[in-house]
Image (tube, rainbow, N blue to C red):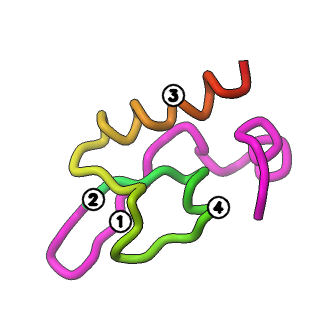
Amino acid sequence: MNGTLASLEAKFPFIRWRQPVLVTWGSSNKFACRVCIATDGLDVKSPHQWKTAAEAEKHICNHITEES
């Protein structure tokens, strides 16, 4: 699926695109970007995972500023 943050928000308005999602791999919890998951998928080696929600939110801000 390709799309900008704005197009994803328009197509799927009930998904919290600007909020990181908690993912669990075994005993490890990380936060991921919903936009990156929608465009690139998600697996255990995905580069779009962070240890804290704040780090993921910082990344999500990049998607917002890319559209400005």
Q: Which mark is residue 23?
A: 1
Q: Amino acid at mark 1?
A: Val
- Helix, strand or loop status at disc 4: helix
Label 2 neighbourhood size at 10 Å, few (<14), some (14-19), many (20+)? Answer: some
Residue plotted at (49% across, 41% down):
19
Residue stretch rendered in magenta on the structure: 1-29
Q: Amino acid at mark 4?
A: Ala
Q: Is residue 49 above or below residue 10?
A: below
- Where residue 20 appears, x then y in whole percent? 44, 46
Q: Which residue is mark 2?
A: 30
Q: Amino acid at mark 2?
A: Lys
- N-terminal of the two: label 2 or label 1? 1
Q: Which residue is mark 4?
A: 38
Q: Is residue 67 above or below residue 23?
A: above
Q: Quadrant of the N terminus?
A: bottom right
Residue plotted at (84% across, 50% down):
11
Residue 57 falls in which quadrant of the image?
A: top left
- N-terminal of the two: label 2 or label 4? 2
Left or right of 27? Residue 63 is right
The residues tagged by marks 2 and 3 sit, at their Cα atoms, a distance apart of: 18 Å
Q: Nearer the viewer, residue 4 or 22?
A: 4
Q: Which mark is residue 61?
A: 3
